[in-house]
Amino acid sequence: MTTLTLGPLAQIARTVRDIKESEAWYRTLGLPHLYSFGSLAFFDCGGTRLMLSAQEKPAPESILYLRVEDIRTAYELLRSRGIEFMDAPHLIHRHADGTEEWMAHFQDAEGRPLAIMSQVKP
């Protein structure tokens, strides 16, 4: 019998109304721009590709959680770039080993949710 092991997530797709506006906004986050053509733009999210595609009516989509090493530093840097957060970095969960999960939420240019997240070891 053959077994299958799926690899890491390769690509996430997100619809947008205006590809040029959204491309500029995602560049503000500091995500490396890979390439664009037609109504598509691609960015690198730490090895997972983010594909933006223009549609007249973007669909509701899941939250994109972007991992950062130091959530407070990332929060301040993104705020200095004009990103408006819905909340400050805050503790979400403490694991049994003491590792803490921290998050801060914001919205993209289309008003859909994103968050930065970080694990803090004891």
Image: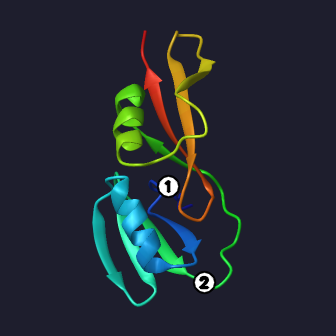
The residue tagged 2 is 55
122 left or right of 56? Answer: left
- Residue 25 location (% of width, % of height): 42, 63
Above or below, comparing residue 66 to residue 11 in the picture: above
Q: Position of residue 71 (x, y in %)?
A: 42, 29
Q: Amino acid at mark 1?
A: Thr
**Residue 76 at x, y percent in the picture:** 38, 33
Name the N-terminal-most of marks 2 and 1: 1
Colour scheme employed for the rendering of this structure = rainbow
In this rendering, is residue 97 above or below 23?
above
Depth check, front residue: 91 or 97? 91
Please name the amino acid that badge 2 sits on. Answer: Gln
Please give the name of the residue rendered at 41% of the width and 49% of the height, measured from the top-left corner. Answer: 82
Dot 2: element: loop
CA gap, disc 2 to disc 1? 34 Å
Q: Residue furthest bottom?
A: 38
Q: Is residue 102 left or right of residue 79?
A: right
Q: Residue at x 51, y 45 (%)?
A: 84
From this view, report whether residue 73 is shown above or below residue 1. above
Q: Is residue 58 above or below residue 3?
A: below
- Mark 1 burial class by Cα count in 10 Å: few <14, some 14-19, many 20+: few
Mark identifier at residue 5: 1
Asked if the residue at tag 1 contacts the one at tag 2, i.e. Cβ–Cβ closer than 8 Å, the answer is no
Q: Quadrant of the N terminus?
A: bottom right
Question: Does dot 1 land on a helix, a strand or a loop?
Answer: loop
Q: Residues within 10 Å of mark 2 (few under 14, many from 20)?
A: some
Which residue is drawn at the image coordinates 46% and 86% (left, top)?
39
Expressed as whole percent of the image width and height from the top left, the position of residue 93 reads: 62, 20
Instruction: Look at discs 2 and 1 and give the one toward the viewer.
Output: 2
Tag on residue 118? none
